[in-house]
């Protein structure tokens, strides 16, 4: 028997079934499955403040010359493969580590200790036969530090983009501070290739670096023009305490250049030692 309650429920169901669908007037796009997509003026998550925007890193300009890329994954037993020269001084040890790496089969291990004078356990690459070229340089690598130095205030050089001619000095040095247990930039530049003047920019300390862990480091440097630029990513996060662009200036333009990977420091009177592992090293430079 159909009660009054049933008649009300059936009437509502029929009315709903007979109601036409709203026509799509094109004001909102739909997906292939018919689902409504956000309107064009909807705020993105970053604009709405839900997630922070990604760090801005300089990209290569279409006006820049072609670039070359050199990579080192240390797959060869001969560590000199791909490098131009060794730089081994004092108390040092270099080798391949097949236990700790980010890409099989091995990483490059660099170790230095106290010595009367500089200790260096690194390899260098010369991108040019003569003078460096103006433009953009990029260093990208995986780094793991194990540093137990005491009785020294000396910082340890980790990576260098180094001017080698005349009175010029390194344009970019990434260093490890064993006291603050963090990274720092240090270096200098020549305001002009012919000026003979060298300007040192102050050290810029960075946040502490967790030891015995792999870290992803990317350095962008632009020099050889009226002013330069320098940026650093540490584990994907932009580090703001880098030298100002005007402190990079003309950099190495007109001088020979070397890119050096491995540890170096003057550790006279120090105790302990310092070890770094490097893997998936990439160096990009103007062709």
Image (cartoon, rainbow, N blue to C red):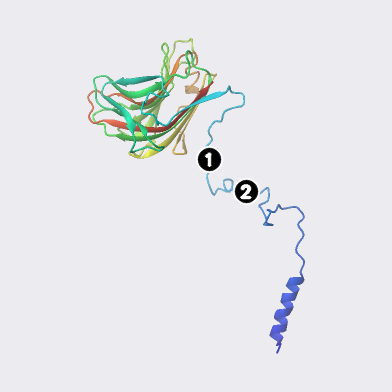
Secondary structure under badge 2? loop
- Looking at the figure, which quarter contains the N terminus? bottom right
Q: Position of residue 281 (x, y in %)?
A: 43, 30
Q: Quadrant of residue 149?
A: top left
Residue 206, which numbered label? none
Residue located beneath label 1 in the image: 54
Q: CA distance from mark 1 to mark 2?
A: 16 Å
- Count of number-bearing discs: 2
Secondary structure under badge 1? loop
Residue 24 visible at all: yes
Q: Position of residue 80 (x, y in %)?
A: 38, 23
Q: Position of residue 105 (x, y in %)?
A: 38, 36
Asked whether, in this view, residue 163 is left or right of residue 40, the answer is left
Residue 43, which numbered label? 2
Q: Quadrant of residue 280?
A: top left
Q: In the rendered structure, are the residues bearing label 1 and label 2 in contact, judged by CB atoms less than 8 Å apart?
A: no
Q: Position of residue 207 (x, y in %)?
A: 39, 37
């Amino acid at each position: 028997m159909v009660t009054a309650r049933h008649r009300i429920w059936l009437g509502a169901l029929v009315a709903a079934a007979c109601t036409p669908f709203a026509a799509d007037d094109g004001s909102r796009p739909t997906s292939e499955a018919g689902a409504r997509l956000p309107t064009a003026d909807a705020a993105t998550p970053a604009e709405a403040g839900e997630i922070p925007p990604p760090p801005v890193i300089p990209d290569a300009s279409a006006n820049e010359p072609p670039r070359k890329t050199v990579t080192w994954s240390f797959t060869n037993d001969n560590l000199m493969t791909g490098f131009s020269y060794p730089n081994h001084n004092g108390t040092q040890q270099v080798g391949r580590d097949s236990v700790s790496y980010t890409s099989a089969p091995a990483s490059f291990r660099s170790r230095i200790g106290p010595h009367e004078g500089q200790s260096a356990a690194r390899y260098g690459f010369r991108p040019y036969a003569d003078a460096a070229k103006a433009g953009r340089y990029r260093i990208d690598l995986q780094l793991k530090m194990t540093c137990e130095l005491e009785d020294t205030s000396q910082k340890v050089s980790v990576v260098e983009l180094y001017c080698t001619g005349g009175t010029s000095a390194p344009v970019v040095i990434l260093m490890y501070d064993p006291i603050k247990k963090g990274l720092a930039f240090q270096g200098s530049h020549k305001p002009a290739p012919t000026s003979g003047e060298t300007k040192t920019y102050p050290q810029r300390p960075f946040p502490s670096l967790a030891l015995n862990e792999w870290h992803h480091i990317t350095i962008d440097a632009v020099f050889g023009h009226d002013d330069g630029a320098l940026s650093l990513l540490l584990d994907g996060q932009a580090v703001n305490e880098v030298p100002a662009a005007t402190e990079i200036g003309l950099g190495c333009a007109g001088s020979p250049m070397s890119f050096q990977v491995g540890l170096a420091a003057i550790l006279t009177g120090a105790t302990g030692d310092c070890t770094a592992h490097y893997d998936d090293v990439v160096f990009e430079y103007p062709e």
